[in-house]
Image: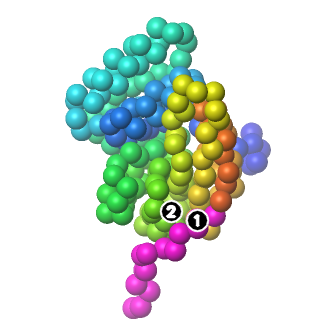
Amino acid sequence: MNGAAGAAAAFEIRTVAVIGAGVAGRGFALACAAAGFDVVLEDVMPANLRKAEADYADLTSLGTVGSLSLASTVEDAVRKADLAVDFVPDELESKLEIFSMIDRMAPPKTILCTPSCSLSITDLASCVYRPERCVAVRGELVRSSSSILRAVRLLYPVAASEPALKAVERFLRALGLEVKQEPDPDVPALVKNTSS
C-alpha cells in the first residue's frame, strides 16, 4: 500500500465510541448503528446502558444494522475506536476532562469529536496530543422521523488535518446530515503559559 492510500485508510470511520448513554448519546449511538456503523456505547449508569440495549433490540427487529456493544469504562469504549464522540455536559471543565481521558486511552488513529453549542474546539484541541484530529459539531446530530435533512456545522481548529475532516464529514453524511465545514468561530478562552 502506498503512503497516500495508507493515510486515507487511517481516516476511514467504521467503529464509533459514544461516551454517555443519556437521551442524546443513546439516540446518536442508535443512529450510528442504524447507518451500519459498529458502535461502542459507554456510560457509568447501568440503567442507561440497559435502555440502549432494549432500544437496539427494537432497531434490529427492523432489519440489518451495525453492531452495538456496551462498555462501563471509557477505556473499554475507545479501545478500537476510529471516532470518539462525547455526550458530557457542554461545560469547559467536563469537556476538558473527557477529551483528556479519551486522548490518553484511545489509539492514535482515533478522531475526537464533541457536540458543543458554545465551546471553542481550538481550546479543547490545545489540551490534547492530537489537535489535528479534533472537531466539534453544532446542530442536532440525530434526525427526527421527518424527511427534512438537518444541517450541522463541522467546526475545526487551525491544526485540523484535511483527511480527518473529510472522514468526519463522510461519516455525518452517512447519518443523513448535511454538513458545512467551518474554522472555529469562537475566541479561545484558554491561554497557555508560554513563559519559562
| Distance between the alpha carbons at the discs numbered 2 and 1 | 6 Å
Q: Compared to 146, does 133 lie above or below?
A: below
The three-letter code of the residue at mark 2 reads Ile
Residue depicted at x 53% and y 69%:
186
Residue 38 image offset from top left, x and y in percent? 50, 27
Which quarter of the rendered picture does the C terminus lie within? Answer: bottom left
For the point 52% across and 30% down, which residue is it? 144
Horizontally, residue 168 falls left or right of residue 25, namely right
Above or below, comparing residue 27 to residue 187 in the picture: above
Task: Identify the residue shown where x is 65% and y is 59%.
Answer: 182
Q: Which mark is residue 44?
A: none
Q: Secondary structure at mark 2?
A: helix
Q: Quadrant of residue 183?
A: bottom right
Q: Which residue is mark 2?
A: 121
Q: Residue at x 46, y 54 (%)?
A: 116
Residue 103 part of the magenta-drawn span: no
Q: Quadrant of residue 2?
A: top right
Amino acid type assigned to the residue bearing label 1 in the image = Asp
Confirm or deny contact between disc 2 and disc 1 (CB under 8 A).
yes
Mark 1, other Cα within 10 Å: few <14 / some 14–19 / many ≥20: many
Q: Quadrant of residue 193?
A: bottom left
**SS of the residue under disc 1:** loop
Which of 141/52 is in front? 141
**Picture disc at residue 184:** 1
The quarter of the image holding the N terminus is top right
Residue range of the region highlighted in magenta in the rendering: 183-196
